[in-house]
Image (cartoon, rainbow, N blue to C red):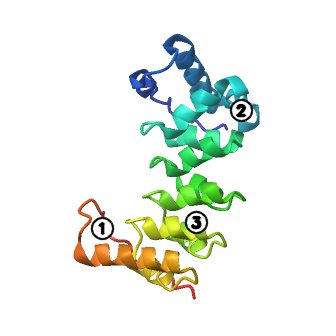
Amino acid sequence: MPEKRLPIDTSFIHTYNWQSPETDIHKALDIITFTQAHPPATCPAARGDYSHISYTLAGHPETPAEVLEHLALCINHPKILERIATNANATKQTLKRLATDGRSEIRQAVAENSKIDLEIIELLVRDQHTDVRYALAENNNLPAEALLVLSSDENPYVAHRAERTRTLHRRGSTSELPPRRTGIRRVV
């Protein structure tokens, strides 16, 4: 028996200041309704004439996780994938897939996401690309254990940035920090 899906609330797309509201809203609705009924391989979002709509949806703070997941599966454009990676609504599954992407700029965008979990942090803390580890070291939402690992990074810029973020944690200088997560395994 097919899984019954709840309808996606599309009211958020009407709050955006579209370039061409009549056609852009229609295209956005096409992508969102398509998400409900079709596999990603046939998604209209992958077509070139939908790229600016996909880009907008990928970065919109109210785009549902299901739409972001669908976009991440059917689009290979790095700028759109970067926006999905930084979107707070992206699911763990979407972020994990993007954290293993071959392009460092997409992994770097995942490292900037405030909602990455320990499993993804453990992947990125060992990333071969310095910019990915640096972006992770800048993330104020990392647990102290991850910052400790990054503070001994072979790259002095990454190590310095991680130490600076650790100092901000200790001072409590960043009032917007959520409670720190714990339990990361130290990777040496």
Write the residue at 52% across / 18% down: 25
Judge whether 20 appears above or below 64 on screen: above
What is the spatial separation of the Cα atoms under label 3 and label 2, in whole angstroms?
28 Å
Q: Splitting the image into 4 quarters, where does residue 174 fall?
A: bottom left
Element assignment for label 3: helix
- Say whether residue 5 is visible: no
Vertical arrangement, residue 26 with respect to residue 124, above or below: above
**Which residue position is annotated with label 2?**
46
Name the residue rendered at 54%, 39% in the picture.
58
Residue 184 horizontal/vertical position (percent) = 48, 79
Q: Which residue occupies 56% across, 37% down?
A: 67
Assess whether mark 3 and mark 1 are in contact (beta carbons under 8 angstroms).
no
Q: CA distance from mark 2 to mark 1?
A: 38 Å
Classify residue 168 as left or right of residue 83. left
Q: Position of residue 2 (x, y in %)?
A: 66, 37
Q: Which residue is mark 1?
A: 179
Q: Residues within 10 Å of mark 1 (few under 14, many from 20)?
A: few
